[in-house]
Amino acid sequence: MLARWPRSASGLSAAPPEPCGSGRKRLSSWRVPPISFLATAFSLAVYFLAVWRGGAPERVGAAILFAAFIVDELYHELAGPAQFRHFDAVELAIDGFSLLAFAWLAVGANRLWPIIAAALQLMAVVGHLSTLAVSGTQRAYWAMTEPPVLLGVVTLAIALAAHWRRQRRIGPYPDWRPERRPARAPPW
């Protein structure tokens, strides 16, 4: 989500900034777009709230989203900012992991929101796969792979509010379906 894009006179550039005389990168040439900063701040706040005040499914969902966020940040720190010009196998792997993890969560959790999160991740995976079939759809590739991630965080935020409201109304309730209660914590 939070990506640092170097600015050039013509707009966004894929080239890294030129080092200063001291050999360090000029900090002024790396800018985080305000929308990326706000989305990242919102996401981190939701992750924190889910771990702090959420039920077990909300904590697992936050862990899935946070793990995908960290891996994505590390990948783009090493490979450079996302360009959305060509198919990206690493991004597909990240979104595929998230899809499988949310599908597992949807099967076992006593909640409906993981189904929505899994559907959003499925949309991102389809976006990656469609780029294999049709190239040159940079905006469509971005639109099918990036918004579902933020919408997953929004889904988790709404799920947290519903969980808190339900706890106030009826008290504690089961996190897992009785027939699907996990014998141990998930492997991640």
Image (cartoon, rainbow, N blue to C red):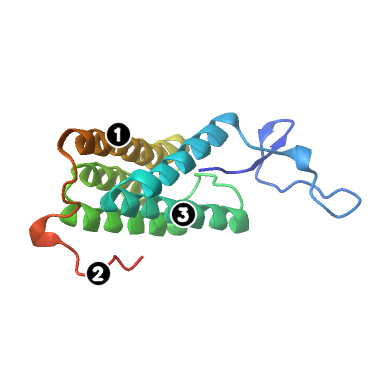
Residue 131: image location, x then y, percent = 39, 47
Q: Say how many tags the image has.
A: 3
Towards the viewer: 114 or 5: 114
- Residue, disc 1: 161
SS at badge 3: loop
* Amino acid at dot 2: Arg
SS at badge 1: helix
Q: Specify whether 51 is left or right of 126.
A: right
* Amino acid at dot 1: Ala
Q: Specify whether 119 is left or right of 42.
A: left
Note whether residue 87 is visible: no
Quarter of the image with the C terminus in it: bottom left
Q: Residue 91 appears in which quarter of the rendering?
A: bottom left
Residue placed at 45% from the left, 35% from the top? Answer: 139
Residue 125 higher or lower than 78, as above or below: above
Q: Are marks 1 and 3 in contact (CB under 8 Å)?
A: no
Sequence-earlier tag: 1 or 3: 3
Residue 20 higher or lower than 11, as above or below: below
**Mark 2 or 3, which is nearer the eye?**
2
Q: Specify whether 57 is left or right of 149.
A: left
Residue placed at 34% from the left, 47% from the top? Answer: 130
Q: Are marks 1 and 2 in contact (CB under 8 Å)?
A: no
- Residue, disc 2: 184
Q: Residue 113 appears in which quarter of the rendering?
A: top left
Question: Distance between the Cα atoms at labels 1 and 3?
Answer: 35 Å
Question: Distance between the Cα atoms at labels 1 and 2?
Answer: 26 Å
- Residue, disc 3: 88
